[in-house]
Amino acid sequence: MRIIITGSIAYDYLMTFPGSFSEHLLPDQLARLSLSFLVDSMERRRGGCAPNIAYTLALLGERPMVMGTAGQDFGEYRQWLESVGVDTSLVKEIGGKFTASFFCNTDRNNSQIASFYTGAMAHASELSFRDVPRPDLVIISPNDPAAMVRYAQECGELGIRCIYDPGQQCARSSADELRAGISNADVLIVNDYEMELVRQKTGLGEEDILRRSEALIVTRGPQGSTIYLPDRRIEVPAVPERRIVDPTGVGDAYRAGLLKGLAVGADWETCGRLGSVAATYALECVGGQSHHFTWHEFKARYEENFGEFPIER
């Protein structure tokens, strides 16, 4: 199956703070907020939603195509992605710009404070599905907001099955942008906090979304995920982690597992379970592209938690 993954392409600067952010927030001083956190460590990792999803999907035996814009510093990153089975032929390098950068500080409670530098990602709307080989499935993950709206509209017009994954851009996107993305997509996936933002901004609840979508997926961290379908609701538990290292990229890994299920025609419950297993592997490593597993290892972990493995590679 030809799968195109759109979204940010970035370098992640991941820091750890040994305390708790909440202990330093003074409710009566929030209007004058000025804080600096001394971190214990920092690592530079390859990141961005699109490569994170694509990396895990490649581990699961697919050869996904990443569609996005990167900067003049992308050469080594491109080579590495190709080496692990990701097709980067649809990535456009923007001269004179740096690849987007994600600066994230994680405290001992796994709460995060982050900033994102757009860089070359601002040019993502220059790309179009009208100029690429027709895909069987697309996921529109967090990216330049204008690009996300354009991609969703094009998928709707061209009849391309797509998943709309606004993620962190729920905060930045307007109500009209969110509605446009949802109305043109076949599936909406968000976490529970983002679902509340969608509800507040657009006035759309679960039933409203399901009138125009085949599925709504809400991830809930340690509580697993919920898959809403027009006729039922499926609760998918989280897979117990062997250790908690870093939550960065966990949601992207879940999406990769979900996509693998859709690629092989699995039912929705199986798709969610595949996502749950993939997410836990990411949680156990630093960054969104540090985890690794063989097909045999993934299958064994699925069966350990959910019983018989129902798909073929």
Image: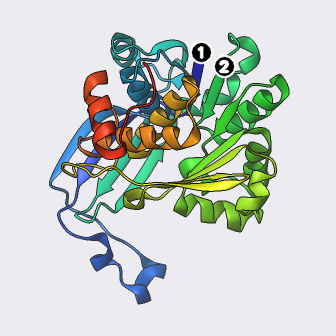
Residue 57: x and y, percent? 43, 26
Query: Mark 1–mark 2 contact, CB under 8 Å?
Result: yes
Does residue 60 appear anywhere in the picture?
A: yes
Q: Nearer the viewer, residue 284 or 121?
A: 284
Q: Which residue is mark 1?
A: 2
Residue 224: assigned label: none
Q: Tell me the crowding category of disc 1: few under 14, some 14 to 19, or many 20 or more residues within 10 angstroms, Cα based.
A: some
Does residue 142 appear anywhere in the picture?
A: no
Residue 136: assigned label: 2
Q: Tell me the crowding category of disc 2: few under 14, some 14 to 19, or many 20 or more residues within 10 angstroms, Cα based.
A: some
Task: Determine whether the residue tagged by mark 1 lies in a helix, strand or loop.
Answer: loop
Residue type, mark 1 in image: Arg
Left or right relative to 86: residue 143: right
Q: Residue at x 64, y 37 (%)?
A: 163
Residue 99: x and y, percent? 45, 29
Q: Residue at x 38, y 34 (%)?
A: 47
Residue type, mark 2 in image: Asp
Residue 90: x and y, percent? 57, 14
The earlier-in-sequence mark between 1 and 2 is: 1
Q: Residue at x 25, y 50 (%)?
A: 241
Q: Name the image quarter holding the N terminus.
A: top right
Furthest-bottom residue in view? Answer: 28
Tell how many labels: 2
Q: Name the image quarter holding the C terminus.
A: top left
Left or right relative to 45: residue 19: left
